[in-house]
Image (cartoon, grey):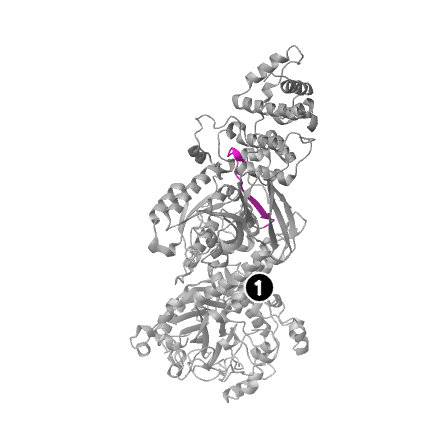
Amino acid sequence: MQLSNPEISGEQSVKIVLLGDSGVGKSSLALRFVTNEFRPYSESTIGASFMSKSITVPFSPSVRNDEGQGTSDSKTLESRQHQRTIGLKIWDTAGQEKYRSLAPMYYRGAEAAILVYDITVPASFVALQDWALELQHNASPELMLVICGNKSDLGECRRVDRGVGEAYAREMGAVYVETSAKDGQGVEDMFSGVAMRIPPLLGQESYLEEDMLDLRKNTRKNEGCC
Amino acid sequence: MTMNDQQGNWAVPPGTTANQGVPYQQTNYGTPTNNNPRVFSRNDSSASNLSYGTNSNNAAPSMGIQAQQPRVSVRSSNSGNVGIIVANRAGDEETEDGRIRNREAAAKIRDAWIYKQIRARQDEFTQYKQGRIFVGTWNVNAKGKDESLSSWLCADWHQHGPPDIVVVGFQEMVDLNAVNVAVENKSQQRSQFWVDRIKSTLNSRENTMGDPTRMYTELAVKYLVGLLICVFVKAPHKPRVKHVHTSSVGVGVMGVMGNKGGASIRLQFYDSTLCFVCTHLAAHRENVAGRNADFANVFNKTSFEIGDEAVKEVIKLGSLNQWAAGTNSVGVSDHDIVFWFGDLNYRVDESIPTERVLELSEKNLLEELIENDQLNIERANGRVFQDFEEGPLTFRPTYKYQPGTDLYEQRPDKKLRAPAWCDRILWLAQEPGHVAQLNYLRSELNISDHKPVMSTFLVTIKDVILSRREEVYKEVMKLLNEFENASLPMVSLDRVKLDFGEVRYDQRVTLPITITNTGQVVAQFRLVPKLDENTLCKQWMTVTPTYGMLIPGEQTEIEFTIGIDNLTSNALNTNKEVLEDVLILRLENGRDYYISVSGSYARSCFGMSVEELVLYSDPIRNVPLDPILRAEKYDFNAKAAMCVPKELWRIVDAIYERGLDERDLFSTPGSPDEVYQIRECLDTGASFENFSVHSMTEVLISFLSNLSTPIVSASLFPTLDIDAQNIQAFARKFLEDMPPIQYNVFIYIVSFFREVLLHRQRNKLSPAKIARICCSCLVSSSQGSPDESKGNMQQLMLHFLETNSI
């Protein structure tokens, strides 16, 4: 891995599409993430709305700095991360069945699809599997798939086991997350997780290398890197 | 929060009420620095160290001149990091329209704004606590055995209690000879010695009384040749210390060796960032410029690689000077509070003779000496320690003593030196009220040629309430995102569902949608086809306009019209088509709106086939469009309910009733309104009103013309030229080849027209004219049949009308 200076990493743009049954909370997830709001009685989305938010994530998805008590130099060195800013362009789609045929407009060309279901509504999980199959057949094989069980705040009404969702995600090679757009649980992490898994732009790193001569003393070379 | 919340963990001077803020008045000690503008920047100073004391700008002490200079203080020195990106053009891209865009710079500027907002609101998420920091410095002249350090390190404990943080700096813990400068062994050994000595002093039985919460823990030690700095914290605070880093800078021989220089430790204490710098600056009474340069050098070169995460964290906490992330290291001035101490080596100005300095020092007459203290003079002129503060010197000069005595060095075999305040402690606080000096003293330990100096400070420490900081951060981000998302075009539509209700054959229904630009930018809209389609909507719908532009506040109507033509009604009747569609209204650079249109087709006999019409005895409107419902109601295998469609019979019957004598029958147009009503009567089974016969005849022609399959299909067209000889045969063949229902209808129509022709005297119709009418409404016109076959058909038709061949 090439360590790079965050100073010169420009914003990368990533298209994410939210898909899933009507009423599972796609718009709420987008709204929570972008404006940190929650509207309990929101109208269903007729169309496809677009929102953007820039976030900063480390270049490598592997290590997350714990905010612990670590004071030693070595620990700080280990957790040192290089950042890049990613502009998430989020397309929130209509969940109603009659608009289903319009969805390809949004997932074509997307880097990631978040398939959302409501953990209290088994039918929405069935619908999600239809979505997953549709994407398997019609979408780019590079499309990153996230399976999101929303409404985790309604744990006592849960009717789809977390294990079931996780197993399905494994089967589909997807990432599994549970979120609550209502209390915000997991929402930020889900989107930043997507952003982190997006490979950096090719130009970003090579560009860095040239410019890093006088910064090199501030960075460490990883051992075993050819 | 007061320290009471911390139940004894916080060192609080007795009798102090330490709530928000500092209970101690920030005393104006009257140091000249307070009255003069200080001009300084990290970049400037690194240049000035090349020319000792000859910098003409700095040499001019006139306030007038200084005031002209831009006031750059160390407090904003580090924003230069961001400038690298923002100020260069490496990231520039040219957009298609020729504008220049630099996303990197834009992102940096955006970050900067965010951090600035958070910093400005730090009081909202910060609890202020009071803590005490002890700073001691001593040039030990390579001495030191087992003398008690209590009178230095613990001198004020009886008054203020043990401090929260103890910082101790030494100079010359080893002889500054060439070997020691080059080899670390001795330094390491001596630093361990002193650290152990300090620890055992602080944690002596007498001090701790066995209470572990009164113990001090070593946080960091850093040495550089003769320099040593070490930081201890009271055990209960240990968990709230993080990002401890050290740094050392040699500025001695050749500008890099460690015989002179600085050793530093920085850390985050609760959520305040603290930096301690212990320096030994250039010696010799006359070398003021050298000391100034050494200071600037250490100041500029000291940097701590704390890592991006730590940098970001302190920025978020509102602590860092830097207003945007982008580096993994911080400098001295990037801290909330800096303590700078050591053997700074400043003496009393040479204008005062050595003997007088000695005399005044011995007599403890300090005023004149303070006025002529080089450090005071240099600071007053902004040449060193810009923005730093120092308390008043109330103790006698600390150098140079005869070791082992309390006498200034005056032995005849030694060089006579003017006593001086070489050993000093200064501080720099981002928030001026956050540091209050409780005392500034010297100890009388006498093993060295210097006396130790110490000072205890009451400092205001930030404790950030993460949840509240997160709230502020979110509020800032929300505000920003609102504005950023507001720069997207936004419109409101008064409705996105258009229900056209019952839509009838040959009827146009229009519903409008009002679109209003509710955003803050110009909005361009247009209807776009669905993916992989190339029409905007179904063929039965027209939209005007299909695109447009609205300035903020402007509104316009988009009209959606459904019109059912023959083709559509055919498709609707056969259930190949339904009146439902979704149109996509796209805002350029914004969201998509889906407009759902729907209507129910009010079934009509128009546009149907005679084969189907004869199946139903019910009015066609009552026959469901849905094939399953229809199958339940009607048995398609049974014999047709009628020989000819009842609708046809009803029209013909009505024309009969109204009389065939009407002049210009079949050539006078009916009234459109009546035509519509007649059609409704046919479709619903309602009885006819007193409609005119001309309206009736128009409906008859229209009914026949609009059948989904004409009565006479193209396959029945005569293939050869018809003449008098073969016409009989052709006619027979023609009728034989006709499917039964078409045959019935054909016979029925021809019979009717023959009846009409019986009244030709009155109605002025001719067989030829009727033949033409028949051809136009019964015969398929879709096959682009040549004129001659049309002629043949007319001849045949004429034959049927004029002879008894049927």
Kind of residue indicated by mark 1:
Ser
Identity of the residue furthest to the left in this view: B210
Of residues B71 and B593, the one nearer the viewer is B593
**Residue B304, x across and y down, in percent:** 49, 63
**Residue A211, x across and y down, in percent:** 57, 51
Identity of the residue furthest to the top in this view: B725
Can you identify the residue that label 1 sits on? B79
Q: How many marks?
A: 1
**Residue B85, x across and y down, in percent:** 59, 57
Q: Chain of mark 1?
A: B
Question: Which class describes the residues within 10 Å of circle 1: few (<14), some (14-19), or many (20+)?
Answer: some
Rendered-image quadrant of the C terminus of chain B: top right
Of residues B800 and B178, the one nearer the viewer is B800
Rendered-image quadrant of the N terminus of chain B: bottom left
Extent of the magenta region: B572-589
Is residue B472 visible to the viewer in this orientation of the structure?
yes
As for residue B340 lying within the magenta part, the answer is no
Left or right of B656 in this view: A165: left
**Residue A182, x across and y down, in percent:** 42, 58
Residue drawn at x 39%, y 83% as measured from the top left: B14
SS at mark 1?
helix
Of residues B654 and B540, the one nearer the viewer is B654
Left or right of A158 in this view: B619: right
Left or right of B144 in this view: B752: right
Q: In the image, is residue B196 above or below residue B536?
A: below
Is residue B532 visible to the viewer in this orientation of the structure?
no
As for residue B581 lying within the magenta part, the answer is yes
Q: In the image, is residue B412 above or below residue B692?
A: below
